[in-house]
Amino acid sequence: MADVALNAEYLAASRAESRRYLWSRIGVYGFLAIFALIYLLPLFVVVANSFRSLPEITHNGLIGLPHDLTLRAWPQAWSKFCVSGACAGIQRNFYNSLMMTIPATVISTLLGALNGYVLSKWRFRGSELLFVCITLGVFMPGQIALMPWAFILGRLHLSNTIYGLILVHVAQGLSFTTLFCRNYYVNIPDDLIKAARIDGAGFWRIFFKIVLPLSPPILIVTVIWQFTGIWNEYLFGVVFTSGPQQPVTAALVALSTNQMNARAYDVASAAVLIGALPPLLIYFFGGRYFVRGLTQGAVK
Amino acid sequence: MATLTISHLRKRFGHVEVLKGIDLEAATGEFVALVGPSGCGKSTLLAMIAGLETVSDGEIRIDDRLVNSVPPKDRDIAMVFQSYALYPTMTARQNITFGMESRKVPKAEQEEAVKRVSALLQIEPLLGRKPGQLSGGQRQRVAMGRALVRDPKLFLFDEPLSNLDAKLRVDMRTEIKKLHQRVGKTTVYVTHDQIEAMTLATRIAVMHQGALQQFDEPATIYARPANMFVAGFMGSPSMNFIPAMLTEKDGKPVVEIAVDGGGAASLPLPYAPARRPQDGKVVLGLRPEHLFRFDAELKARKPALASLIAPVDVVEPTGAETIAVLKLAEREIVGRFDPDGAPRLGERLNLGVDMANACLFDPVDEALIPRAPA
C-alpha cells in the first residue's frame, strides 16, 4: 500500500515536470518563431510585390498579398526596363556580375590557398609578421581603399571595366582567403610535408598532390564566402563603373533611385530577387559544407 | 666501412644549444638506437641526419659524402615517422609509390618494387585502402613499406612504435628486428624506450641534455654504464644507487654501506677499481637482479656474493618475478627475485649481493670508476 501511495506521488511529480517542460518548449519555439517572422517580413514583401501589378501596389500599399498573380514584372526587369538610359533590363549587368565574380572568386581562392600553404608549411624569417599584416586587411573597411584603387585603375587603364573590378576584388579578398586557408593548413601535420620532402617531392608537387587534395572543406568555405561577398558588393561597382559596365548590385541601386516617372515597385522587386539569386543558389547547394567547414578543425 | 659518420655536430636554436658536439657512426648494416628522455635532442639529431633540420656546426657524412647542405631527397635515406605520416588522400599503394613517382621511376619497376615490399610486409590485401581504413599496426606496416621500397642507404626510424598499444608494440618490435636481419640495411632508430633500444640495436647511443653519454654495445651499456645517468636510464626497475665508502681490508678492496638499524656492512669487491676518489666516498650501483636471498649453495656458485641484513618493506609479485623494496639505513633499494623463495613482507632478509656485477661511481662527477686491468 505504501508503495502505491509513493507511486502516485511520484507520478504527479513527473506529470508536473513534463507539463513544465512542454510550456518551456512552447515558450522557446514561440519566441524563435516571432523573430523568424520579423526577419522574413522584408523578403515576403519583395517576393509578393514582384507578383503584383503596379496599380494594385499603388492602390493597396506596399505591404499586402497579391490579388491576382501577374508575372509581368519579371521579364520587364530582366530585359526591358530602362536603367540609367539603356532600356535592356538588368540582363547585361547580371552577366557583368558573373564575369566579375567567377574569376575573382577562383583567383582569390587559389592565391589564398597558396599563401596559406607558404605561411603554414614553408615558414621563413618574418612570415608570421607577414601573416599578421595580411590579416589586418580583414579589419580594413573597403572605403579606405577607394582612392588608391581609383589611382591604380586609372594608371592601368582599367577604369570602368570588369577586369578592373576583378583586380580590386582579388586583392581585397586575399586577406580572408589567406586567413581561412592558413588556419586550415596549420592543422595538417608537418610530418606529412617532411615525409614528402624525403620522398623527393618539391614545393609544387607537395602543394598539388598532398595539400590541395586535403583542402576541399576549406576551399568550399572560401568559395562560398568570396562568391557571396563579391557578388553582393556594390561600393566598388558604383564608384569604378558606370552604365552598361556596372555589376548587377550597382544597377539595382540605379534602378531604384534614378526614376523619372513613378516608382516601379513591381519591377524593382523582381530585379532585386534576380540579383539575389546566385548567392542564394550557392548557399543552397554548398551551405551544409559551409557550416561543416567552418566548424571542422584537423585533418586526421 | 661506416655508412653514417657524424662528427662534432652542433645545433643551436637562437641562443639555446640543443646538441653539444655529437660524435657518432653507424657501420654498414648496423642498427644504432638513439635513446634518451624527451628533450635530450635525439629527434633533432635524427631530423638533421634526414636533412629536415639545418646543421649549426660539425659534419654529417653518408657513405663518406658530406651531406650537411644536401636536401633530404638527395641523401638516399628513408624515414618512418612516429605519426606514420601517411598521405591521407592516397591509397596504401599510392603512398608506397609516391616517392618513386617523384623520382620518375618507370611504371613496371614501381610495380615490381610494390610487389616485393608488400610480400615482405604482408600488406598485399591492404594496398587498395586509404590510411583512414587501416588499423594502427597496418598503418605502421604501410609506413615501413614506403620506406623499404626505396632501397635507400640509410633507414631512419623516429619512435615508430610509440603510438601502438603495448601488445602490438612488442610484436612490431620483433617484426622490425626480423626485417633488419633480412634486409640488413644501416638503420638509425630513435626511441625513449630503453627496452626497444636494448632488444633491437647492435649499438646504443644514450643521450642526455644534448650530449652523448655513452655509445656502445647493449651488453656493455647495461653492465658497465659510463655514468650514473646511463646506469639509471637503462634497465627497469632502475639501478640502485647507495652512498658508500671504498676502503681496504687485508689489502683487498671493500665497499662499506650503512644498513638498517645502524652500523655498516662491508662488501668485499672482487676486482680492483682503477682509481680511488679522495676521502674514499663512492656511489655503489646495484642492479635489482643482482640481489638474492643469501644461501650457502648460491655462495658456492657466486663467490663474489656478499651478505647483509635488510628488512622487507613492500612485495610486488608480477608473476614471472617478484619485486621487493628493502630498507637500508635511510634509503630503500629494489630487488628482483625469483618467485620461489621470494622475500616475505616484514621479513628481515639475509640479502645476498653479487659484487661481481657491482658498479662504482664517483659521487662528484657521477662517472663510472673503471676496473683496473687484471
Image (spheres, coloured by chain):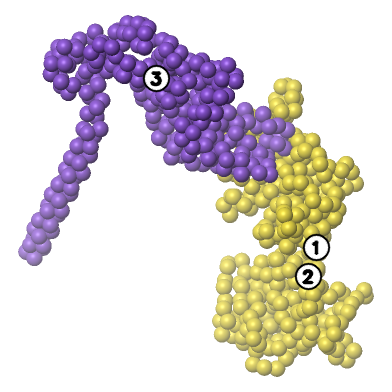
Chain colours: A purple, B yellow
Chain of the residue under label 1: B
The residue furthest right is B374
For residue A261, say whether it is visible. Answer: yes
Relative depth, front residue between B39 and A151: A151
What separation in Å lies between label 2 and label 3 (alpha carbons)? Answer: 80 Å
Identified at 68% across, 42% down, the residue is A124
- Residue type at mark 1 is Gln
- Residue type at mark 3 is Ala
- Residue type at mark 2 is Asn
Location of residue A110 by image quarter? top right
Circle 1 sits on which residue? B214
Identified at 29% across, 14% down, the residue is A259
Give the secondary structure at mark 3: helix
**Circles 2 and 3 in contact, beta carbons < 8 Å:** no
**Circles 1 and 2 in contact, beta carbons < 8 Å:** yes
Circle 3 sits on which residue? A250
Residue B339: % across, % down: 61, 72
Circle 2 sits on which residue? B227
Give the secondary structure at mark 1: strand
